[in-house]
Image (cartoon, grey):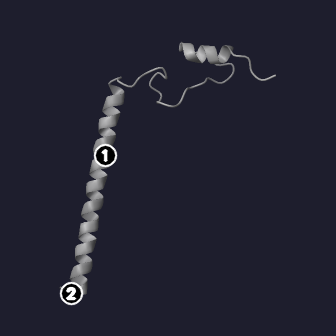
């Protein structure tokens, strides 16, 4: 096997592995997105994310979410 054949083999294998990893990543993304859209993990945050909580800017209408209302009712610094 010549050097060129070896390099071509390595290049083709690298491309195929990269495409395979991309397809697996896309499949996992779609499965996770479908699970979130079905409402399984839609908890207290209202579906905006697992670790994030949305706070409206001052003067905006208060959301119907009870956790956001209690956050607005808390007194701010001294």
The answer to which of 40 and 58 lies nearer the viewer is 40
- Location of mark 2 (residue): 2
User: Is 36 displayed left or right of 45 in the figure?
Assistant: left
Give neighbour class at mark 1: few <14, some 14-19, many 20+ (Cα, 10 Å).
few
SS type, badge 2: loop
The residue lying furthest to the right in this view is: 78
The residue at the point 30 percent across, 60 percent down is 18
Q: CA distance from mark 2 to mark 1?
A: 37 Å
Q: Position of residue 51 (x, y in %)?
A: 51, 31
Q: Is residue 24 positioned above or below 13 on the image?
A: above
The residue at the point 58 percent across, 18 percent down is 68
User: Is 40 displayed left or right of 55 in the figure?
Assistant: left
Q: Position of residue 58 (x, y in %)?
A: 69, 21
- Location of mark 1 (residue): 26
Would residue 38 be seen by someone viewing this image from the given angle?
Answer: yes
- Give the quarter of the figure containing the N terminus: bottom left
Q: Tell which tag, 2 or 1, sits nearer the viewer.
A: 2
Q: Is residue 21 positioned above or below 73 on the image?
A: below
SS type, badge 1: helix
**Residue 72 occupies quadrant:** top right
**Residue 54 occupies quadrant:** top right
**Mark 2 vs 1: CB contact within 8 A:** no
Q: Position of residue 49 (x, y in %)?
A: 47, 30
């Amino acid at each position: 096997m010549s050097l060129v054949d070896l390099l071509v083999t390595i290049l083709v294998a690298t491309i195929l592995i990269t495409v395979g990893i991309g397809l697996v990543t896309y499949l996992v993304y779609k499965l996770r997105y479908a699970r979130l859209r079905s409402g399984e993990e839609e908890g207290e945050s209202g579906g905006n994310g697992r670790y994030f909580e949305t706070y409206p800017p001052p003067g905006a209408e208060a959301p119907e979410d009870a956790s956001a209302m209690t956050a607005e009712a808390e007194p701010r610094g001294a």
